[in-house]
Image (tube, rainbow, N blue to C red):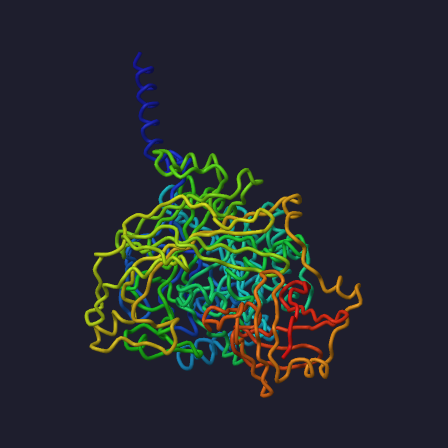
Amino acid sequence: MKTRRRDATALLLGAALSGLMLSPALAQQKNPERNAYFGEQHVHTSWSLDASLAFGDTVAGPEDFYRYAQGQPITKVGGYKVKITKPLDWGATTEHAEYLGVYPQVLDPNSPVRKHAPFLSEAIKAGAGGDAMLAYKLLSVTIVKGHPIKELKGPEVLAPVWKRLVEIADKYYQPGKFTTFAAYEWTSTPNAANLHRNIFFKDTKKVPDLPFSAIDSSDPTDLWTWMDGQRKAGNELLAISHNSNLSLGLMFPTEVDHKGRPIDRAWADSRLRNEPLAELKQVKGQSETTPELSPTDEFAAYEVVRWVLLGYKGAAPDYGSYIRQAYKDGLAMEGARGYNPYKFGVVSGSDSHSTAVPYRQKNFFGVHGTVDDTPEKRQNGGALGLNNLWITPAGLSVVWAEENTREAIFAAMQRRETFSTSGVRIKVRLFGGWEFGPDALKQKDWVKTAYAKGVSMGGELPVAKAKAPSFVVWAVKDPDSGNLDRIQIVKGWSKNGQSFEKIYDVAWSGTRKPDPASGKVPAVGNTVNLATATYKNTIGAVELKTVWTDPDFDPGLDAFYYARVLEIPTPRWSTIQAVKMGRVPPTIPGPSIATATIQERAWTSPIWYTPSAEARKTVTPGVTVTELKQKGAVALGDAELKQLIVGKTVTVRNTVTGQRFEILYGVDGRRLITAMNGKTPELDVMGDLLHGPQAQYEIRDGHLVTEVAGAEFDVTVYKLGDRYVASRSREFSYANYEIEEVK
């Protein structure tokens, strides 16, 4: 009897102990309606060469970031302690794979670097103590020019560092409470173009012995091939492109890649398979869009940074560098070629090179080590041609997942059920479907119903079951930030090689009324006091929600939809810190960066609509250049083009939209759109409907050449009988323009 009691007691005690030892993930219930988990997918510590050598972050390593992310204070470059305003749910350090962990190794007398390259080791230490930026430039040039230092790239140097990074991620993983990943950055910078990707592994037990770096290859297609090989070996992984705004138009190509190779279906499939996400916002600006790409978007002039890596001095085109345009180009490619490489979701991050990350305007302490570790440096300094005032607090990556575990968060990233914020903790949901009625949000279990009847952000609408899709969108404010101004739906669509966008205000605070002509809701107001760098939450809303049906839907056209949520204006960090220093808030000429106030925001991943083959037949097909030539059309040469247009006003009809433009081509190489549909146009709404409102033009090699947002556009004019028909580059070989009159 006593034995039985002891056995029973032991069983009960064992059960109790095992209950205490269960991880939170096992103890908690999975939420089938999913929770929003805020995380960091892009940060560097002293283990990244540029962080340690160029920016002086020799203080804090990967473990310090994980402690910081969970709410513990850490010591930052400059010798002072910093603390996150609110702990993260998940995160990963993404150290540069190129010369990974070199600086910590030069400090270790037992490291392979010290043993095999003592002179190089001493040179790196000397550089850090003297002209660190020069030392960094010299080392980085060896990578960019394709002549890496063999003593710094061998497996005996990299493997122990990579292994330790994976071990550290495991050390700080607390399923159900805080999730970490094995991750790194592939840092390809061909000819100063930023083609960087962050690589995430699902399982720390299934990772390669070495990361694939830009030293192995700077070609994204080689990275994707390596990733496919990893997947076959059982190592599940994904890539996140970042800072496309610094890519010189090469992150999202449409015709050829950075090596001049044609973009084809195999390229598109490889990219789709490996890169489900792109980084929309980080400390070096946002990559959503620009005023030049989106001239009718009144909120496009937000943290637009046009800096280029490595001191590059050439033009930096917006086309190919921004996410919204990539979405639009992807639709056009789908319609013209039958594939779309740009169906990706969005996240955000920091790219901090100081280990610690500031996400709030009020808690901004710099991100580039010794370059911006004091308020004075942040107001006055910079490095590598990057003005510190351009820098912005980090963005946040948010996933909707059933639980806070690697498996659930990775699955959310793979299915693109993600959204991005400018650093605040706005929560937003977006569902699309064909069966949502106007009362969908009134149901207590509306989220459950939305999952059952539709698709969430990152998804694709099924075959049409109604005249137009409806979207359920909901947002709630960050309790520690400004109230909400409005929710917008950003729609893009494509027809005959041309792509378009329209922004709908769908929910807003207060009693404002949309303008009857434009449909735009007036500004929410501004409570910011610039003298004190404070604001009042006396305007705006805590929560916004609505069910919106697309009033302009065409079932035969490819389309995407994403939600953008805006806060009321609040003070930017540069204003807050200037006031504390007794200075006037700084501004930089132009509407995009270093503004006195800012409207924090969130962006969802899109929901896509792809027409069926039958639906596509309802759209009148456009005429292609090939079809024109088959009918006997002949392209005009330089002399014929000059005779046709120079010094004359040409009336051109866009056959896709029906719009007519009167364009004066001056003899001085300037041209001006003088009328649109018979009326004098507003210069700020013309955009790239043909060339832009006013610009230089050049006749060269049989093309009429102009520039829009830093990118060249070539127009070829064909004569077909007594008609003149034109095709424009970036419209996928469609001839969408007809010259109706020349006078």
> Which residue lies most toward the top here?
1
**Is 461 displayed left or right of 544 in the figure?**
right
> Which residue lies most toward the bottom here?
668
The answer to which of 345 and 67 lies nearer the viewer is 345
Please state the horizontal and vertical placement of residue 276, each as a whole percent of the image: 54, 52
Please state the horizontal and vertical placement of residue 40, each as a whole percent of the image: 41, 55
Looking at the figure, which quarter contains the C terminus? bottom right
The answer to which of 668 and 478 lies nearer the viewer is 668
The answer to which of 188 and 590 lies nearer the viewer is 590
Determine the residue positioned at 59% across, 45% down.
234
Determine the residue positioned at 36% across, 71% down.
369
**Is 389 displayed left or right of 308 in the figure?**
left
Please state the horizontal and vertical placement of residue 65, each as a whole percent of the image: 37, 58
Q: Is residue 371 above or below residue 350?
A: below
**How many numbered marks have been drawn onto this rendered protein structure?**
0
Snapshot quadrant of residue 684: bottom left
Q: Is residue 186 above or below residue 651?
A: above
Determine the residue positioned at 20% across, 77% down.
582
